[in-house]
Amino acid sequence: MSRIVVITNPASGRGHGARALPRVRAAFSAVGVADVRATPSEGREARAVRDALDDGATTIAVVGGDGTWGRCAAALVESGADASMAFLSGGTGNDFAKNLAAPSRDYEAMAALIAGTHSEIRADLGCIEHEGGRDLFLNVAGFGFDVAVLERIQRGGRLTGSAVYIAAAARELFSYPGFTLRRDGGAPRPALMFVVSNGLNFGGAFRIAPAARVDDGQLDFIEIGDIRGLERLPLFVRALRGAHLSDRRVTADRAATSELSFDAPPAFELDGEMRYAASTEVRVRSLPRALRVIAGPATV
């Protein structure tokens, strides 16, 4: 017999998660699901997932943004449990849901879908390995410019939704100095940004990997080279619609694994959350078909 547990992060989306909680409870109550749990603080999602599994959950519905979704997905995969997960939008970018046919912003429709008949996929996760251990990500990992943008976002502000990332990126666009990257034993080269993408979008509005699939067993690697000054602006605009890949200074490929080397242990972002490597050498790899995801209505 299936058992559905709903986990919400009240802090997601700069408070959107807390404001949405009454509607989430009502939507799931309408389909007979009463177990809706709010995490006591950001970063406690892994504990909430383990508790739900200990209580017999076979499906965990997560209300939050990419950071909340990523932490919950990582906890479920690390547990080894054969439970499914569903994602309801309650954060800033909500990017991973853009890879699915499920109506993530419509809580009533999502509750009915999760409790009723639906289709599932086996989604991949990404994994960053370094001397300090490993970190899993659901949608995207980034090095370089992406980290500078996240640091600016974490300083706070009044904007919400996709505008948060766009505004922060615009402010960093001309000041970020770049970094040096070595990949798969190659020569060192200057770079503005290096993104490892499982899904199509990041930053709420940027179609960073237009051909990515979350269930192909591979990751998309997008490297933006040594672009400086005003030349960054048109590329930034083109990335909003996924047209940046035609620029000769942008390289993109798809692989199951890649070895990265930096001048110093790098900071990186996973699903909008800051992390720090403990070594200059980093391995990135796909974990194929690691997560059961409720992807949309049942197919005939």
Image (tube, grey):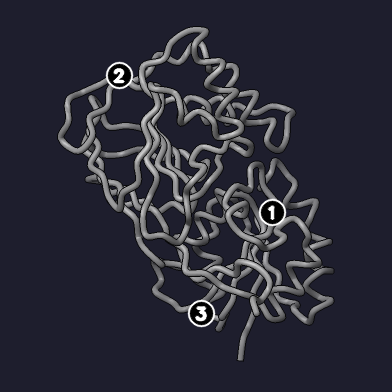
In percent of width and height, residue 82 lies at: 46, 79
Task: Provide the secondary structure element on which disc 2 rests.
Answer: strand
Please rate how many residues cluster around mark 1, counting C-alpha atoms within 10 Å: few if below 14, some from 14 to 19, many from 20: many
What separation in Å lies between label 3 and label 2 (alpha carbons)? 48 Å
Q: Say if 17 sits above or below 141 in the image.
A: below
For residue 190, which numbered disc appears in the image?
Answer: 2
Left/right of residue 60 with respect to residue 282 in the rendered view: right
Marks 3,1: beta carbons within 8 A: no
Q: Residue furthest top?
A: 229
Mark 3 or 2, closer to the camera: 2
Instruction: Find disc 1 in the rendering and name its residue.
Output: 89
Picture quadrant of residue 201: top right
Q: Say if 92 sits above or below 213 in the image.
A: above
- Where the N terminus falls, by quadrant? bottom right
Please rate how many residues cluster around mark 3, counting C-alpha atoms within 10 Å: few if below 14, some from 14 to 19, many from 20: few
In percent of width and height, residue 114 lies at: 68, 74
Instruction: Find disc 3 in the rendering and name its residue.
Output: 54
What separation in Å lies between label 1 and label 2 (alpha carbons)? 36 Å
Which amino acid type corresponds to the residue marked 2 in the rendered image?
Answer: Pro
Specify which label sits upstream in the sequence, 3 or 2: 3
Please count the marks in the image. 3
Which amino acid type corresponds to the residue marked 1 in the rendered image?
Answer: Ser
In percent of width and height, residue 296 lies at: 65, 68
**Which residue is drawn at the image coordinates 38% and 21% (left, top)?**
249
Q: Nearer the viewer, residue 121 or 19?
A: 121
Specify which label sits upstream in the sequence, 1 or 2: 1
**Which residue is drawn at the image coordinates 61% and 74% (left, top)?**
119
Which amino acid type corresponds to the residue marked 3 in the rendered image?
Answer: Asp
**Which residue is drawn at the image coordinates 56% and 73% (left, top)?**
120
Mark 3 or 1, closer to the camera: 1
Q: Say if 115 sits above or below 130 in the image.
A: below
